[in-house]
Image (cartoon, rainbow, N blue to C red):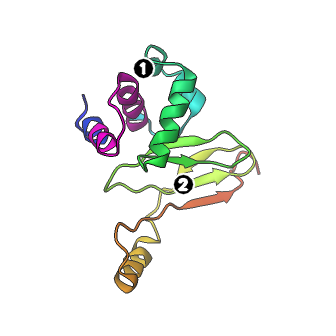
Amino acid sequence: MDPLVAETVDRCRELGMRRTKALEQLLATLLESERPMTLSELAESERLTAQCDKATVFRLLQRLAEKGIVRRLGLHERAAYFTLLVPGRHQDYLICTECGLIESVKAPCPVHQLEEEIREKTGFRNLYHELEFFGTCPSCV
């Protein structure tokens, strides 16, 4: 098993989740993906079709999102996309309001310095942010 998957499974267990093959395969699939994935894409992935059904994938994603292991992205009226939150890694996203395309921002995060200032001034611990930009992609213009 990939060390990062094993580490994430351990985080899940610390948060009260059971270690299952479906959980391991879901985490591995999200980790290997170069972009956020929808519920359908995950449920139909080669790894997960042999392990569980779409309802199980949905329940796992809901629990992982509640526990802060997975981030849910997207517009509320469109399919949600899910991505794994990995400590020490940060990713911001561009989301098309027309077609729902989601892609990573290929630029340094402009909020890291502000986050540090807020942490110092307020004393908040475990401070983090999630940044999503909404607009119309070049294909939809």
Out of 13 and 133, give the one closest to the viewer: 13
Q: Helix or strand or loop: what does disc 2 sit on?
A: strand
Left or right relative to 131: residue 25: left
Q: Earlier in the sequence, mark 2 or mark 1?
A: 1
Outermost residue on the bottom side: it is 121
Residue 122 in view in this figure: yes
Tell which tag, 2 or 1, sits nearer the viewer: 1
Q: Is residue 47 above or below residue 88?
A: above
Tell me the quadrant of the picture where the N terminus can be found: top left
- Of the pair 72 and 135, the residue shown nearer to us: 72
The circle drawn on residue 93 is 2
What is the distance, in whole Å, between disc 2 and disc 1 at their CAs? 26 Å
Does 76 appear above or below 52? below
Question: Label 1 belongs to which residue?
Answer: 47
Residue at position x 44%, y 13% in the image: 50
Would you say the magenta stretch is mainly helix, strand or loop?
A: helix
Secondary structure beneath dot 1 equals helix
Q: Residues within 10 Å of mark 2 (few under 14, many from 20)?
A: some
Q: Indicate left or right for 29 with 133 as reference.
A: left
Give the mark count: 2
Q: Is residue 35 visible?
A: no
Residue at image position (30%, 37%) is 9
Q: Which residues are magenta?
A: 9-31
- Say whether residue 81 is left or right of residue 90: right
Q: What residue is shown at x 57% (from left), y 32% (from top)?
A: 39
> Hey, which residue is sitting farthest top in the picture?
50
Residue placed most toward the observer, 70 or 35: 70
Indicate the position of residue 107 as horizontal and vertical percent values: 46, 61
Amino acid at dot 2: Tyr
